[in-house]
Image (cartoon, rainbow, N blue to C red):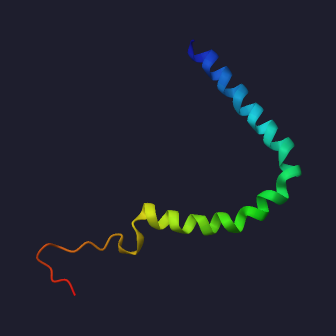
Amino acid sequence: MNFSSKRAWLLAAVSAALIAVYLIYPEHRQHLFGLMPYAFLFACPLLHFFHGGHQHGHRHQPDEQHP
């Protein structure tokens, strides 16, 4: 498979996805916006888990006294 046919398949897939989203969005808009508050609540623990919590960037030196 050469580059131009890969590019054509990618363009076709992206176009099909955009058309599907355009057609499905009006029917399911209320579901999406109804779940939005839960998405924010779920994002908070995930950000703390992947970002390192409250101690991110506050590393102590080995010779430093810990309170």
Would you say 31 lies left or right of 47 here? right
Q: Quadrant of the C terminus?
A: bottom left
| Residue 25 screen position, x and y as percent | 83, 49
| Residue 3 screen position, x and y as percent | 57, 17
Would you say 43 lies left or right of 33 here? left
| Residue 45 screen position, x and y as percent | 52, 67
In which quarter of the view is residue 6 placed? top right
Q: Residue at the location (44% across, 60% down)?
A: 50
Identify the residue at the far top of this view: 1
Q: Residue at the location (70% across, 29% down)?
A: 13
Identify the residue at the far right of this view: 27
| Residue 66 screen position, x and y as percent | 19, 83
In which quarter of the view is residue 1 placed? top right
Image vertical order of residue 24 relative to residue 61, above or below: above
Identify the residue at the far bottom of this view: 67
Would you say 55 lies left or right of 19 here? left
Count the labels in the image.
0
Would you say 56 lies left or right of 7 here? left
In which quarter of the view is residue 17 placed? top right
Q: Residue at the location (63% across, 15% down)?
A: 5
Image vertical order of residue 5 relative to residue 64, above or below: above
